[in-house]
Amino acid sequence: MPRNQRSKNEPWRIGILFSQTNWTSEVERTQLCGTLLAIDEINAGGGVNGREIVPVIYEPGSSASSYVDVAKKLMIKDGVTSIFGCYTSASRKAIMPVVERFNGLLWYPTPYEGFEASPNVIYTGAAPNQTIVKLCSYMLRTYGPRFFLIGSDYVYPRQTNRFLRECLLSQGGIVAAEQYVDIHSPRAAFKPIAQAVKESGADVVFSTVVGQGTSHLYQAYAEAGLDPKCVPIASLTTTEAEIHAMGCDVGEAHITAACYFESIQSDANNAFIARFKKRFGDHTTPNVCAETAYFQIYLFAQALEKADTLDTDILRPYVLGSSFESPQGCVSINETGHADLQSRIGRANRNGSFDVLVETPSMVMADPFFLHGPID
Ligand code: ACM
């Protein structure tokens, strides 16, 4: 029996795994902020069924093998069943066997490559059909058909580019080049890539570079004299966090597709930003990964209230089909364990926020195996 169920007076203990150091810490720190803000708010409102949520937090240091170690620690030593965390798909894939072996529930708040489903994972970040289809046609229509694909060398970029390539070719586009760099690459590695973009005659660069490499790529791009107003970099992961890290002047005019931008004009989002800044300081800005980390805690708490147990087999059915009014708008978990989300395209401005260019009128269904084809 999970340790959480032993006494009705004990808090609900949940595991939190976001890296605070190394390659992907810039954005993972914001995911931790989103998570802690939601936990604080729920606890301030009396917790769940009168019991506080208590986070058990470990630091995986942006290393997939460390994720495995701390996931084991959470599930075996700490008796935790629900884990909230992981940024890269490499870390998610690394800990899935642990979560599945101990029948836990991993809540994963990051856009990812799709083509995966597990009864032990709730995918709250966007699947490719929710972002790429619209982004691909927008970029093609607005900038031209020649795409240069550049990614960090691991599963998310390679699978995402496979999906993008299909979308692009089906719309008459051309892949000018496809290159990968090690996720740990230093800044110098991006200089020849920027040069290759320049020589390729590409109309659009589609980047699946993540973590520190994002700043390196965009800075090398600026240094090579490439003009994002003519040939922008389009991405699914270059959020406000990465734009601030690279310099708002460097990020200006590049394009990102995401379900949330800090610039969304709504009372719910204004209130969320105010609470976020009050808790973490005026210098912090939420982004899609932080907002997703935030709303998934609320979805969890709603399901937990009904289940009144952290037993995965009892909790999960209450998660499927549940909805929440999030700062991005309504979000909902469908029967595949993926989130139906809002879909937007934004262009970074000089202040480091995004001007929203395209917005769907309602949630886009997550279709992780792309069974329903393009919905544009
Ligand atoms: C990612 O690796 N899913 C960003």
Image: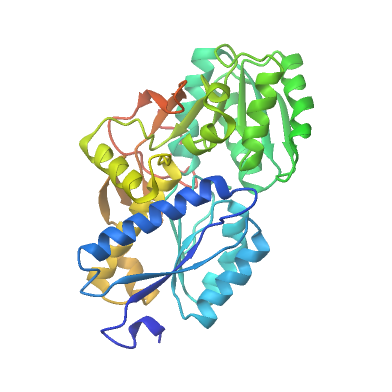
In the rendered image, the vertical position of residue 211 relative to residue 192, given as above or below: below
Please identify the quarter of the rendering in which residue 173 is found.
top right
In the rendered image, the vertical position of residue 196 relative to residue 207, given as above or below: above
In the rendered image, the vertical position of residue 365 relative to residue 319, given as above or below: above
Residue 241, image x and y in percent?
50, 38
Residue 354, image x and y in percent?
42, 26
User: Which residue is at a point 53% across and 18% down the rendered structure image?
Assistant: 140
Q: How is the image coloured?
A: rainbow
Residue 278, image x and y in percent?
32, 47
Q: Could you tell me how many numbered marks the image carries? A: 0
Residue 115 visible here: yes
Residue 352, image x and y in percent?
46, 28
In the rendered image, the vertical position of residue 338 relative to residue 94, given as above or below: above
Between 260 and 162, the one nearer to me in the picture: 260
User: Which residue is at a point 40% across and 84% down the rendered structure image?
Assistant: 3
- In the rendered structure, the answer to whether residue 34 lies left or right of residue 348 reads left
Quadrant placement of the C terminus: top left
Residue 320 visible here: no
Quadrant placement of the N terminus: bottom left
User: Which residue is at a point 27% across and 56% down the rendered structure image?
Assistant: 322
- In the rendered structure, the answer to whether residue 353 lies left or right of residue 205 reads left
Between 54 and 173, the one nearer to me in the picture: 54
Please identify the quarter of the rendering in which residue 44 is found.
bottom left
Between 163 and 27, the one nearer to me in the picture: 27
- In the rendered structure, the answer to whether residue 91 lies left or right of residue 30 reads right
User: Which residue is at a point 54% across and 21% down the rendered structure image?
Assistant: 249
